[in-house]
Amino acid sequence: MTGKIVRLPILLFCMPFVYISLVLDTLYHSSFGFMALLFVCLAIGFYSKATNQLKWWTLGNVVSTILSLVLQSKHPDWQFIYQPFHPTLLVLGLSGLYVIPQLIGIFWATFLKASSKE
């Protein structure tokens, strides 16, 4: 049972964060989606290091980016909303930016593990 609970968040690693944040931005004309998902990314990075699932984290980021690219292609109107950026470039750039809070979460998990051993 605990093995299933540990593996459950692997599905969260594959969530298309960029697509969700762009949809929320388009629907509500607010950057709340970007900010909320930054905290989710921070938590996912922390969790992946704390449970030693960094290989799944890496794979999840690749799958998340690919899913976001595929899903954004269904919204040709985003070309006009997010000018001067092409939606594909925007998804790739935001995917890179969403890795930063995940790396910060990984750093804090490493730091807290090291300090708890002392």
Image (cartoon, helix red, strand yellow):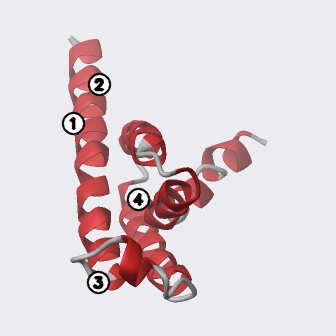
Amino acid marked by disc 2:
Lys
Residue 12 pos. (x, y %): 57, 54
Crowd band around label 4 with a 10 angstrom C-alpha radius: few (<14), some (14–19), many (20+): many
Kind of element beneath mark 2: helix
Give the number of the disc on residue 107: 1
Mark 2 against mark 3, which lies toward the viewer? 3
Instruction: Tell me the quadrant of the picture where the C terminus can be found.
Output: top left
Amino acid marked by disc 4:
Trp
* Residue on which the image places disc 3: 86
* Residue on which the image places disc 2: 113
State how far apart marks 2 and 3 are (Cα). 41 Å
Q: Which of marks 4 and 1 is nearer the N terminus?
A: 4
Q: Which of marks 1 and 2 is nearer the N terminus?
A: 1
Q: Earlier in the sequence, mark 2 or mark 3?
A: 3
In the rendered image, the residue lying farthest to the right is 1
Is residue 16 rendered to the left or right of residue 50? right
Mark 2 against mark 4, which lies toward the viewer? 4
* Residue on which the image places disc 4: 57
Mark 1 against mark 2, which lies toward the viewer? 1
Q: Earlier in the sequence, mark 4 or mark 3?
A: 4
Residue in the image at 29% along x and 25% along y: 113
Residue in the image at 72% along x and 49% along y: 4
Up/down of 109 relative to 45, above or below: above
Mark 4 against mark 3, which lies toward the viewer? 3
Residue 95 pos. (x, y %): 32, 65
